Amino acid sequence: KAGVTQTPRYLIKTRGQQVTLSCSPISGHRSVSWYQQTPGQGLQFLFEYFSETQRNKGNFPGRFSGRQFSNSRSEMNVSTLELGDSALYLCASSYGTNSYEQYFGPGTRLTVT
Amino acid sequence: GQQVMQIPQYQHVQEGEDFTTYCNSSTTLSNIQWYKQRPGGHPVFLIQLVKSGEVKKQKRLTFQFGEAKKNSSLHITATQTTDVGTYFCAGPDTNAGKSTFGDGTTLTVKP
């Protein structure tokens, strides 16, 4: 089975711009979660999508949003980028919303200058 | 809010020595997961524990879930250089999240 894929792998953006990241889960997995990883804050939960609906949301500002498509692929969007948004954004897929066994993609390394 | 804490933050060992990392939750967990992240990589799922007092082994790795389901440990016997990385524990978030991750224990192994 193919693993979780994320595109792009690396991004450099300027403050104030917006960015869209993409995630394709493992085939058959319907839950996709997004995490932000930084050296200082560790792994922070952003949101989870299941069956095209946001099921859970972490404590992040409204500039962070996401969506899920009918094929379970997911995108997350960050608007009005700030320097502090520089991080590794990880997508994780799991079978269902009550499944905590998560499989992570390689991540998108976002640098905001 | 719910907190998941791991100790130690860093551990440096000589190859062949044993290693243990501990995970403690501020709330009772229905289950707990362990992940390993190699330098420059992404977290990789290792195992899930569900039952109180459960012990599972994967080759040189032994995972334990506490009787009260608020703590867990990962023990590596006779470390190898391939064990290098950060080990995270995670549990279901009781506050409208998916999972709460500990801050991880970073293991370095000197050959």
Image (spheres, coloured by chain):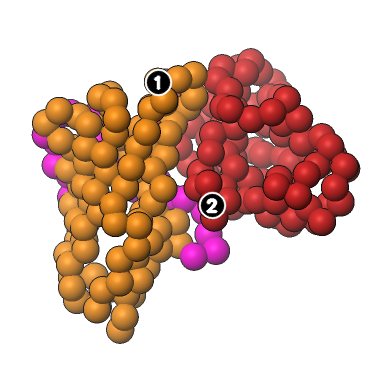
Chain colours: A red, B orange
Question: Where's residue A73, x and y in %?
Answer: 67, 31
| Residue A21 part of the magenta-drawn span | no
The reply to whether callout 2 and callout 1 are in contact (CB within 8 Å) is no
Q: Quadrant of residue A75?
A: top right
Question: Where's residue A44, x and y in %?
Answer: 53, 39
Residue at coordinates 53% horizontally, 46% vertically from top-left? A41
Q: Nearer the viewer, mark 2 or mark 1?
A: 2
Relative side of B111 to B68, left or right: right
| Residue B41 part of the magenta-drawn span | yes
Magenta span: B39-57
Residue at coordinates 49% horizontally, 19% vertically from top-left? B96
Question: Mark 1 highlights which residue?
Answer: B94
Mark 2, other Cα within 10 Å: few <14 / some 14–19 / many ≥20: few
- Give the chain letter at badge 1: B
Relative side of A107 to B96, left or right: right
Q: Kindly indicate whether the residues beneath marks 2 and 1 are on one polypeptide chain.
A: no
Amino acid type, mark 1? Thr
Relative side of B75 to B87, left or right: left
In front: B12, or A72? B12
Question: Where's residue B79, x and y in %?
Answer: 24, 70
Question: Mark 2 highlights which residue?
Answer: A40
Amino acid type, mark 2? Gly
Residue at coordinates 41% horizontally, 25% vertically from top-left? B1
Q: State whether residue B65 is above or below residue A88.
A: above
